Image (cartoon, rainbow, N blue to C red):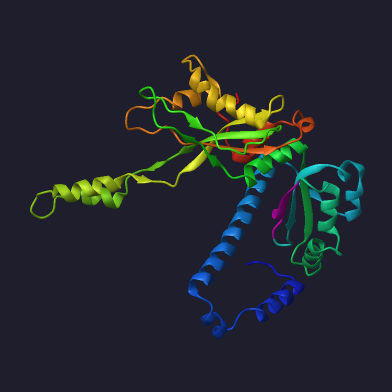
Amino acid sequence: MEEYSQEDWGNHSQDLHGYPTDQELDEIPVTKRALKIKQESSEEAQKRDIMQNIVQILESVQLKWELFQSWTDFSRLHLSNKLAIFGIGYNTRWKEDIRYHYAEISSQVPLGKRLREYFNSEKPEGRIIMTRVQKMNWKNVYYKFLEITISEARCLELHMEIDWIPIAHSKPTGGNVVQYLLPGGIPKSPGLYAIGYEECMERPPSPHLERHSLDPGKEGRVDLETLSAQASLQVEIEPTRIIYCYLGIAEVRTLQQCLFLHFQANTKTFSKDWVGINGFLSQNCIVDPGVSPKSIYIKFVEVERDFLSAGSLVECLEKAIGYPLKFNN
């Protein structure tokens, strides 16, 4: 069950008074109500996914929980001006295992200040924690953190907050070669960029479909038309997902220049000897008749040049996505 402090219950009760009556609901078009509910559920799901992703990062680097004793501890010099990924945890008198209460990437506010807000009873975040400890909902409160650089913070922003942009391609020219068509608006500034491709996973045939497709019926005959239709349904397509394959650092060149070199120059100077991301993109431009090239996507974020050389950006992104980048090795 979700735990609520007394104040939470009070706020919850007040919120209930603000809900529309049945009569008011009848006056709201069904489509508008459905859209509002869908929007709210989508936003909550997105927040939950981001927090889960942050928790996975914290768990992957195997940090130890530190017991919270006094919020003045966060005024210490080593926490005062650092950016970090941090988590707040708790246990109870009944279960010693520490569970996550909250996790966040503190990329704009120094870690020390952000943690003080969570452990200061005068702040909304701290009030919730204090109330749950006072009411013995929780036994102890803990925290853990991983210091990150500004460039690593931007890298995580690239992953969690920036949408993929699909790369269009031309019709085949010169027989079986297509050309990438980069979108406009790519910044002429330094930063980070990622390249990915769309992967479509196939699920094993459904046992139900298999059983019926092999059943000839009472007369011992197979309806070829029905069998064909069933066979076409046996390969069920999973929703597509975009796989990261390369993280680029536009430090010497701009984002626009780097992406142009990947997507435009290689189609004109293609060589079978090319390897890495350029070889992958070039080979993807050569297609068989009637076959489309693999769908390619990009995303990018501007970062000040002075910050790009700090941190371990490739490892940072690999931890966040949970698998290695194919063309960064």
Q: Is residue 127 magenta?
A: no
Q: Position of residue 149 (x, y in %)?
A: 77, 37
Q: In this orientation, which residue lies closer to the viewer: 248 or 224?
A: 248
Q: Quadrant of the N terminus?
A: bottom right
Quadrant assignment, res 251:
top right
Provide residue 262's location: percent of width, then percent of height: 56, 26
Q: Going by the image, does 5 lie left or right of 216? A: right
Q: Would you place residue 277 above or below residue 13 in this image? A: above
Where is residue 136 drawn, in percent x and y?
A: 77, 67
Residue 319 appears in view: yes
Give the camera-side residue of 207 and 29. Answer: 29
**Which residue is painted at 7% across and 53% down in the image?**
219
For image coordinates 54% across by 35% down, the residue present is 196
Q: Residue at x 49, y 70 (%)?
A: 31
Magenta stretch in the rendered image:
95-106
- Residue 174 vertical position relative to residue 305 in the rendered view, above or below: above
* Image quarter in which the C terminus is found: top right
Q: Is residue 68 visible?
A: no
Q: Left or right: where does residue 208 sit relative to residue 64? A: left
Q: Is residue 101 magenta?
A: yes
